[in-house]
Image: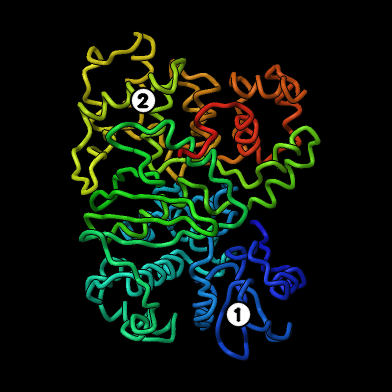
């Protein structure tokens, strides 16, 4: 079992006294004299150390009877970077809870996906986070409810079910308990600058992150590799379609100095929590850039790259199976050719969607639809066609699962067992779909070229040995090395 930062009282007190926003989401401060809990960067005068106690999650604070601070809104903190850094049971469970699995399938569904008993899951989460899966999911529902109450004109009954509550009574009781206000009072107190919805089902919100965040390679990569019909760059925003549990959606993500502006259009409001979670994962918003950059900066040859443009993130994905398919389509071809191959699949086999702004036309094809494709219709070499059809068959039957609950090492090994899968393809899927922050691409041509220019070893074996000092953040080192090239993936589109 991991030991969380909340157990280091002295360090937590220092973070609270310095109002260090870097630690928002790492732990929460409960104030014994007021009965509220805050994020470390809360702007109020810090309480005396003897009146502070620390918890690893908002759910644990709520279970202990504390209410969320109305000033610092601790439920809007970035998520803990631990769940993106780790691949153990707790981290995999937290990623699934963020993806709404408990609300849709209950704790038994969560346990089944992880391959453990419900008792084991309960015990592990309680030991590390001070709350079980039901309490963690309830805290997430409360956050979603507050967001909908404050930013939409939806009736309260619609909000209750959209946020995942089974009844209006449970919704009312939870909101009162967590925020010490009735839902109607929360709406009355909301800022009056609430943006008007552009269309029915559209919601505008801010996605927080830990500074610094360099948007260049993040949005540059997504825009340069965008599949026509599914993704586009328009008016300073990355837009794409989303396949979601209850329907589909369209999201527009715009980088701002202190947040990511997110505009979501959903066919079913119950998908809000999942859509937000997947957008945060796509942009790697829960990362701890200071810790990552500090370690990479310790290498004198990487330090100038980090100092020049700190806060690079790893561009990830909203759909792990989709990315695995696109990685195969991109084997040994240019970015433009990979986009063309993917666009043909989308036009022929994707589900059509209606985009009020135009430009987006389809969802990326499901694995079930791709599994039914006649291989002879695929305009690609015979060996890559075999790789594609084999991967799709394994994705469709579940024998290869790159989802958020996956074991990184096991999934990578299963990918390498498939015909046509070498280390580069498996590792790029590990980096961008599985979310492994330590995935590394020593055979990548761009990496080897950058290494040679910087004076790093350029052979895969020697570079891997040198990169041992960058662990567990080698995927971020890849972003800094790629950024030495003038490829469009490294630049924010104009």
Please name the residue shown 35% across and 61% down the image: 204
Q: Position of residue 415 (x, y in %)?
A: 47, 26
As measured in the structure, the alpha-carbon distance from the residue carrying label 2 to the one carrying label 1 is 50 Å
Location of the N terminus (image quadrant): bottom right
Return the residue at label 1: 30
Location of the C terminus (image quadrant): top left
Q: Secondary structure at mark 1?
A: strand
Residue 30, quarter of picture: bottom right
Q: Is residue 260 above or below residue 375?
A: below
Please name the residue shown 56% across and 87% down the image: 35
Q: Residues within 10 Å of mark 2 (few under 14, many from 20)?
A: many
Q: Position of residue 387 (x, y in %)?
A: 38, 17
Q: Nearer the viewer, residue 241 or 84?
A: 241
Q: Nearer the viewer, residue 270 or 404?
A: 270
Q: Is residue 189 above or below residue 85?
A: below
Please name the residue shown 64% across and 74% down the image: 54
Residue 198, quarter of picture: bottom left
The first of marks 2 and 1 along the sequence is 1
- Spot the residue most to the bottom: 33
- Spot the residue most to the front: 494
Residue 348, quarter of picture: top left
Q: Is residue 365 above or below residue 153?
A: above
Q: Is residue 365 left or right of residue 309?
A: left
Please state which of the two labelled residues, at mark 2 or mark 1, is closer to the viewer. Answer: 2
Q: Position of residue 373 (x, y in %)?
A: 22, 22
Number of numbered callouts drawn: 2
* Label 2 close to label 1 by CB (< 8 Å): no
Q: Secondary structure at mark 2?
A: helix
Return the residue at label 2: 339
Q: Which mark is residue 396?
A: none
């Amino acid at each position: 079992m991991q030991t969380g930062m909340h157990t280091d009282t002295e360090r937590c007190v220092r973070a609270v006294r310095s109002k260090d926003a870097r630690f928002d989401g790492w732990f929460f401060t409960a104030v014994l004299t007021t009965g509220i809990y805050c994020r470390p960067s809360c702007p109020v005068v810090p309480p005396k150390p003897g009146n502070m106690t620390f918890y690893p999650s908002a759910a644990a604070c709520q279970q202990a009877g504390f209410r969320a601070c109305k000033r610092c809104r601790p439920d809007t903190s970035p998520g803990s970077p631990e769940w993106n850094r780790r691949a153990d049971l707790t981290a995999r469970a937290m990623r699934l809870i963020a993806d709404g699995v408990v609300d849709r399938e209950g704790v038994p569904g969560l346990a089944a996906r992880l391959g453990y008993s419900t008792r084991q899951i309960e015990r592990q989460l309680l030991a590390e986070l001070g709350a079980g899966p039901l309490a963690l999911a309830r805290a997430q529902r409360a956050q979603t409810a507050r967001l909908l109450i404050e930013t939409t004109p939806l009736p309260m009954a619609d909000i209750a079910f959209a946020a995942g509550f089974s009844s209006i009574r449970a919704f009312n009781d939870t909101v009162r308990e967590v925020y010490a206000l009735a839902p109607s009072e929360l709406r009355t107190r909301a800022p009056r600058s609430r943006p008007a919805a552009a269309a029915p089902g559209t919601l505008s919100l801010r996605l927080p992150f830990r500074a610094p965040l360099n948007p260049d390679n993040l949005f540059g990569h997504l825009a340069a590799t965008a599949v026509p019909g599914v993704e586009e760059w328009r008016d300073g925003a990355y837009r794409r379609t989303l396949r979601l549990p209850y329907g589909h959606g369209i999201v527009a993500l715009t980088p701002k100095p202190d947040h990511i502006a997110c505009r979501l259009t959903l066919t079913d409001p119950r998908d809000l929590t999942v859509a937000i979670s997947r957008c945060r994962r796509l942009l790697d918003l829960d990362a701890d850039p200071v810790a990552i950059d500090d370690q990479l900066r310790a290498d004198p040859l990487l330090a100038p790259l980090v100092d020049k443009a700190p806060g690079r993130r790893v561009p990830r994905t909203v759909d792990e199976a989709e990315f695995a398919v696109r990685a195969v389509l991109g084997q040994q071809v240019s970015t433009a050719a990979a986009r063309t191959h993917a666009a043909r699949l989308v036009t022929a086999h994707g589900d059509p969607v209606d985009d009020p702004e135009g430009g987006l036309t389809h969802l990326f094809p499901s694995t079930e639809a791709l599994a039914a494709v006649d291989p002879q219709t695929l305009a690609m070499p015979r060996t890559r066609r075999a790789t594609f059809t084999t991967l799709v068959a394994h994705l469709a039957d579940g024998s290869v699962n790159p989802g958020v609950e996956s074991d990184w090492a096991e999934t990578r090994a299963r990918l390498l067992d498939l015909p046509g899968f070498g280390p580069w393809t498996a590792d790029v899927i590990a980096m961008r779909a599985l979310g492994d922050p330590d995935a590394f691409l020593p055979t990548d041509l761009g990496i080897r070229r950058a290494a040679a220019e910087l004076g790093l070893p350029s052979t895969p074996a020697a570079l891997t040995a040198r990169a041992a000092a960058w662990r567990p953040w080698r995927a971020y080192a890849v972003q800094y090395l790629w950024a030495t090239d003038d490829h469009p993936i490294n630049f924010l589109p104009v």
